[in-house]
Amino acid sequence: IISARSEAASRLASSMGRVAHPALSLPLLCAALAMSCFPRSLAFGQAALPSLARHALKAARNSHAASLCFVPSHLQHSSGVSRASLASSSQFQQRRTLASGPGLRTSPYARTTRVKMGAGGKSMDVDEVVDTAAPGGEQGDEPFQKYQGEIFCNRALNMKRIRAVGFDMDYTLAQYIPETFEILAHRGAMAKLVNVMGYPAEILSLPDYDPTYFQRGLMIDKRRGNIIKMDRHMYVKVAFHGTTLMPKAERVATYGTMKHKDYTPADFANIDTLFSLPDAFMYSQLVSFVDAHRDTHPALRDKSYAQIYKDVRRSVDLCHRDGVIKDEVMEDPARYIESEPGIVDLLKRLKLSGRKVFLMTNSLWDYTHAVMNHICGKSRKDQWDFEWLDLFDLVIVGACKPSFLEDPNLSLFRVHPEDGRLSNMDAALFDPAATSLAQGKVFQGGNWQHLHYLLGDAVTSGEQVMYVGDHMFSDVIRGKRSLGWRTTLVVPELEHEVDVGLQEAMRVKRIEELRELRDELDEWGDRLALLLVDCNNDDNCAVSS
């Protein structure tokens, strides 16, 4: 478009300074118009031409396609070029096409900028492309593909060799709602601390659990009462004493010289499950409370930080054992567990593929029965039935992981679903698997040998089993190292991180495109600087070196 308008190009060039070489008409035109790339108007004279060309002339590398070249408004009447004309290189062609010839409407992305040009200070209107894609989700953001449930693989896996697929239940098939479930656990455990362990009733007035306060991957320093965040080099980057952020000097003095061997389980506890998040929050609250009230409450004077941690763990375990948490969830599962209708379809597809599908959870039968009915869309007790068992070839409750994967001496019991009774399975490893399963497929306890045996001829080695869980140690590491299972880790916190990464990838791509354009413009600017001449109105001038 631009190269065909040699007369218009010459007129523009004459306003910027005489150019003797006819081949420079297009580069100078692009140089004059490339200022549209900048967010504000620029004023420059004849001496600024090399600098301007440096930003623009890479766009004129090809005679017919410049990366970003815009036609000034005052030329459109004399030359017939549309105001919104744009010659785009291939890298911008795919991203956005504005307009490309006479008769096209002005692009919605174009705006007019008033620019002073030439030694005489003449002004002209330049159409400018305005990118409305703003970061941060504002209107005009370029669309990006959010996380759609893809599975990320750390190594190649041939699914043809997988003959059985197993699932954990809590935080795997069943995703709990933090705002209700974890607050329920926090309140129940605080009540146990007061009613069973003699803590002052004032702790019941402490703030409720905040699901955003901590996340997995932190560590509890039980001896010092701290919550710490470490990097992969075992350097403590952030530390809280109770609920108070530790100053850098104190943090470095405490942990700066510690080595890997110093972080022993006796003094440190990992926050590696979603169940442990309320524990960490409660521990930090109690540390701050005890520090502030040792003198006013005699029962707290001898409480060490390690004893506080033991009390927190005991109170949470009591809540799980006596039904304070699980009985409440069973009364109204929809309030505490997210609805996941796609889970049922997933399990059905796996069974149709010919693979064995099993459920292995540490939860006991009554709670498992309630949660699985909710997952199948039956949340009320009067709707519960045993149809969900058809989704599995084998169900093991009360598995006591990770001992299930390590101790070959654990006993297996049969569960009678109608009333929850247990019966011995002394001959579990001697009777044919089909015989054992004919009397029911729900069991409690046992060990990995029972599991492999009951899966029958489908599984002859651990590498034919894939297990999906949420616990890094008891579900993933132990199954892989001890038995050779293929394992899948469910990390719900990463969904947001993946979405942010995908969105930022588009920003990074655009930055790379702009950098490439800048480099090309710099290159052509340097070339043009060697060719510019001052002709002093002499038509026969020569190009200076």
Image: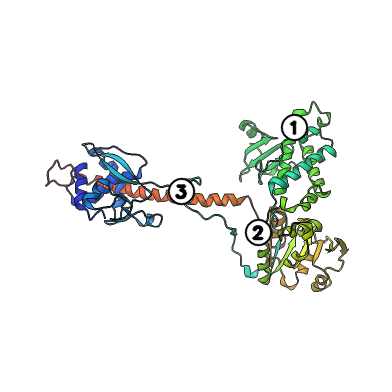
Quadrant position of residue 212: top right
Which x, y percent locates residue 370? 77, 57
Q: Quadrant of residue 464?
A: bottom right
Residue 124: image location, x then y, percent: 26, 42
Can residue 486 be seen in the rendering of this structure? no
User: What number is the disc on residue 140?
Assistant: 3
- Specify few, some or many for label 2: CA neighbours under 10 Å numbering under 14, 14-19, or 20 or more: many
Q: Is residue 233 visible?
A: yes
Between label 1 and label 3, give the one nearer the viewer.
3
Residue 199 figure quarter: top right
Upstream in sequence: badge 1 or badge 2: 1
Q: Residue at x 57, y 55 (%)?
A: 147
Q: Which residue is mark 1?
A: 289
Q: Position of residue 415 (x, y in %)?
A: 84, 63
Which of these two is toward me, 525 or 192? 192
Q: Is residue 423 above or below residue 20?
A: below
* Residue 62 as seen in the image, left or right of residue 171: left
Mark found first going from the N terminus, 3 or 2: 3
Q: Residue at x 86, y 69 (%)?
A: 427
Q: Which quarter of the figure is the C terminus placed in?
A: top left
Residue occupying image coordinates x 50% and y 49%: 504
Q: Are marks 3 and 2 in contact (CB under 8 Å)?
A: no
Mark before the other along the chain sequence, 1 or 3: 3
Specify whether 340 is left or right of 13. right
Where is mark 2, residue-wise?
488
